[in-house]
Amino acid sequence: MRIRLLVVLLMASLCDAAAQVSPAQAAYQKANALFVAQKFQECLNELDIALRLDPKLVPALTLKAKLAMTIYRFDVARESLERALAADPTSFYAQFLYGLEAYLTNDLELALPRFEKARQLNPADPRAALYLGMTRESLGQPADALKLYEEAMRLEQSAGAPQADTFLIGSRLLLMMGRTDDAKVWIDRALKLEPNSRAAHFELARYLEEKGDSVKAAVEGEAALRLPGGDPTDVQIHYLLVRAYRESERPADVARHAEAIRAIGDPKPK
């Protein structure tokens, strides 16, 4: 889930609306288009031009940080975001990405105050609430995390852009807390938004497994396996199906999925 959410965040990009732009802004806008096209080296070249012309251009610095995180250069991302915040301490997006950099490097104690500050800068943005919730959940604060997930969902609804992933993140926490019926409500809302979501069908299978309905859990697991996407992985789904078929006493299907796990772990040369 974290990978999918990161892709959504990093590929989201805003274009400047001004008719007249400076040479530095023009270079930034070109870099932005190249980033969206995933032409990362060309994007970096244009960012170098933009920042040479204007070292304090915050959109260019945040774009450089997004690019750096995309290629796992978190040191470069951190340095770029610190420069951006020095230039504009009120930049919500720079502050949010600063929290994201700490979160993705598993420095949760550092991510926490960064996301809190991002929320203070822009209380209406659901991303800060969501990631602050994920940070608190990782730090063993499930009740606080759930409140933040609910707030993130409310903000998404207010903006007219509810996200299935947000419901699924919350449903996992509810399932872990033993609130299975509430988890089902959140999973259903995710499926309503994205009926062909691999992750949503997988979470429904997990819910059914928790409720002891191994037959239906297997049906949903097989549905998830047929859908495209990398989160959850094929291995995760196969393991769930092994458990579901074992519980429903279908040894041939258990063997089939166990063999699939072995094949993924030790792929045969083509």
Image (cartoon, rainbow, N blue to C red):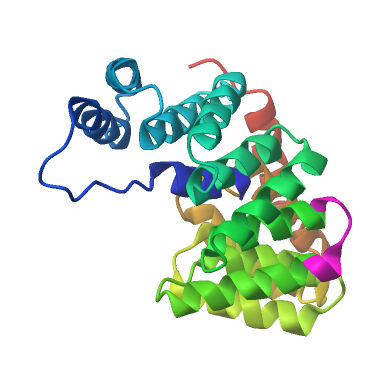
Visible residue check, residue 139: yes
Q: Position of residue 164 (x, y in %)?
A: 52, 67
Instruction: Give left or right: position of 163 versus 166.
Output: left
Q: Which residues are magenta?
A: 138-144
Instruction: Give left or right: position of 213 versus 157.
Output: right
Visible residue check, residue 219: no
Of the pair 94 and 154, the residue shown nearer to us: 94
Task: Determine which quarter of the picture holds residue 50.
Answer: top left
Task: Determine which quarter of the picture holds residue 131.
Answer: bottom right
Residue that appears at 78% across and 72% down: 174
Q: Does residue 142 show up magenta in the picture?
A: yes
Q: Position of residue 6 (x, y in %)?
A: 53, 44
Q: Does residue 123 show up magenta in the picture?
A: no
Q: Residue furthest left?
A: 19
Instruction: Give left or right: position of 118 versus 156.
Output: right
Of the pair 17 and 13, the residue shown nearer to us: 17
Q: Position of residue 98 (x, y in %)?
A: 60, 39
Of the pair 184 and 246, the residue shown nearer to us: 184
Residue that appears at 39% across and 22% down: 55
Task: Determine which quarter of the picture holds residue 222.
Answer: bottom right
Residue that appears at 77% across and 36% down: 107
Q: Position of residue 143 (x, y in %)?
A: 84, 70
Residue that appears at 55% across and 79% down: 189
Task: Give the number of callouts.
Answer: 0
Decide: is 154 above or below 249: below
Decide: is 12 above or below 156: above
